[in-house]
Image: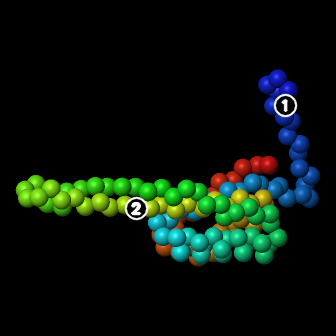
Amino acid sequence: TMAGIPPVKKPTPTGEVQVHKIRITLSSRDVKPLEKVCRELVKGAKDNKLRVKGPMRMPTKTLHITTRKSPCGEGTNTWDRFEMRIHKRVIDLRSPAEVVKQITSINIEPGVEVEVTVSDV
């Protein structure tokens, strides 16, 4: 782009379907169901002959909570350490929006959260 002038968006011909960049973000506490949903999404996208990138593995977030074992505060100072790990996967697609609805209509495992972001090319 030149000095602050936004690029001119070309209108798409009526016969051409507009292609979107779609990012599907999956997150879960368990790896197995997360990987299963990723596999199904990628398989569905490849069956429809879409360009797929992923699943890209994001760093695992580990949430820690340290708490006293004793409810009343008396006795030996003993501590419980709990942690919850959140695993995240990102899949990028380039396709029309209707196809994405079809792909993401698969049954998603319980405990897996799906977030779909759509942007124009």
- x and y, in percent, of residue 89 in the image: 60, 62
Q: Which of the 4 quarters of the picture holds residue 11? A: top right
- Number of other residues with Cα within 10 Å of mark 2, as a class: few under 14, some 14 to 19, many 20 or more: few
Kindly tell me whether residue 98 is visible in this rendering: no
* Residue closer to the observer: 25 or 56: 56
Callout 1: SS: loop
Callout 2: SS: strand
| Marking on residue 84 | 2
Q: Which of the 4 quarters of the picture holds residue 82? A: bottom left
- x and y, in percent, of residue 69 in the image: 18, 61
Image quarter (top left, top right, bottom left or bottom right) of the N terminus: top right
Examine the rendered structure and indicate whether residue 103 appears above or below residue 81. below
Give me the residue at 70% from left, 63% from top: 54
User: Which residue extends farthest left?
Assistant: 74
User: Which residue extends farthest top?
Assistant: 3
| Amino acid, disc 1 | Thr
| Residue placed under numbered mark 1 in the picture | 1
Give me the residue at 75% from left, 54% from top: 21
Give me the residue at 85% from left, 58% from top: 17
- x and y, in percent, of residue 14 in the image: 90, 55
- In screen coordinates, is 1 left or right of 102? right
Examine the rendered structure and indicate whether residue 52 appears above or below residue 65. below
- Number of other residues with Cα within 10 Å of mark 1, as a class: few under 14, some 14 to 19, many 20 or more: few
Marks 2, 1: nearer the viewer: 2
Kindly tell me whether residue 104 is visible in this rendering: yes
Give me the residue at 59% from left, 57% from top: 58
